Image (cartoon, grey):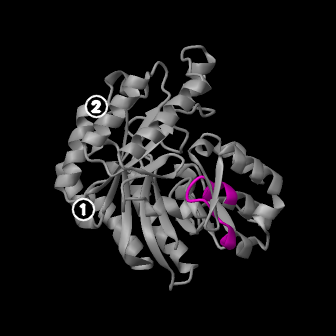
Amino acid sequence: MPGLYVHIPFCEKKCIYCDFYSIESFRQYDSFLDALHREIAMRADVLPHDIRFHSIFFGGGTPSLLTDVQLGGVLEALRARFRFDDDAEVTVECNPGTVDAAKLRGYRAAGVNRLSFGVQSFHADDLQFLSRIHTAEEAEQAIGAAREAGIDDVNLDLMFSLPGQTTERWMHNLERARALGTTHLSCYSLTVEQGTPLARMVARGMVTMPPEESDADLYAQTMDTLAEWGFEQYEVSNFARDGHVSRHNLTYWRHEDYLGFGPSAHSTWQGRRWWNLSSLDRWLDAIASGCLPEAGGELLDRDTLRREYIYLRLRSEGIDLGDFSRRFDADLVADNRAFIDRCLSGGTLQLADGCLSLTREGMLLCDAICAGLE
């Protein structure tokens, strides 16, 4: 079942590692919201009206800069134009430094039932290095305020493999997240993305990233620790307590359709992919002229769909071989017999009940295994 994504491009301060489209200027805030409503209406006019969506995800940027009234207005615009499940998941990414109890109560009243807090670390020096605007104490207060507002489905983003990060410091982050009663954790390795301030710092020798062996050790310990605490690893970087997986993220990993709104947002719909202009000014101009703000698009051929299906499904729930055969009229195991047999005997893949999936050891080699199946 498809989902909706809304990109809010504004940030109080852009983090050194972030390569998503975002801006620190708030000069065009009202114009952005007006145009967002118009984009929603324009897109709805060219789609069938009997489609039901199961999730809405506000990402960014910093969506939690929206007031409850502004966020509620966007949700009303979406509900006026699209149909949703009665229990649709509505998620807002939050920077803990931008929310308080009153705002979160307003979010809940508007229909938000899931929050994703970009905590990254509970250590002050890590937060300063990453250029986060919140403190560890503000993160804990925000999570408590979410629960008081009646939002119990709470995710925390945490980041490992920071320069100088020890196993003890990383475990402290996990333990504090657990103590807060977190229902979902997204644990990512700090990655140096081209064009970011972090990439320039590394190139100039100002920052030295940890070796790959250290990164792998921290990841393995994360998997083992969270499994002991009752978290299911349902995707390479995502861990959830029973009943708290992210339905919206599963849309991506199951290779299902989704629509995106806002500058730089991507969409995949019935074999076509397109992406919006990654410039607020150009996005605004396109909508003002009555045009959908697409920067480009492509029809997805069979080979592309097959390759993406393998990558997305293998890194999450695994590949349903029957579904794969129906979609692509191919036998994945027969076509890759030698490689799959090596992975099965090497303990990186497992095959059970018609599903080919990664083992714990396979999670560490996900990209290489996916490439071997292409």
Res 43 seen here: yes
Residue at 47% across, 34% down: 221
Q: Residue at x 61, y 64 (%)?
A: 255
Which type of secondary structure does the marked residue at label 1 adopt?
helix
Rendered location of residue 41, percent (x, y): 48, 74
280 w.r.t. 135: above or below: below
In the rendered view, tell whether residue 98 sits above or below residue 349.
above
Q: Position of residue 373 (x, y in %)?
A: 76, 53
Could you say where residue 12 lies in the image, as x and y percent from the top left?
37, 38
Quarter location, residue 259: bottom right
Disc on res. 108: 1
- Is residue 311 a member of the stretch shown in magenta? yes
On the question of residue 39 being in view, the answer is: no
Mark 2: which secondary structure? Answer: loop
Give whichever of discs 2 and 1 has the lower sequence position: 1
The kind of residue tagged 2 is: Thr
Q: Is residue 95 left or right of residue 322?
A: left
| Magenta segment | 310-323
Residue, disc 2:
135
What is the crowding at mark 2: few (fewer than 14 residues within 10 Å), some, or many (at least 20)?
some
Residue shown at the point (49%, 39%) measured from the top left: 188
Left or right, 324 with reference to 8: right
Marks 2 and 1 close (CB-CB < 8 Å): no
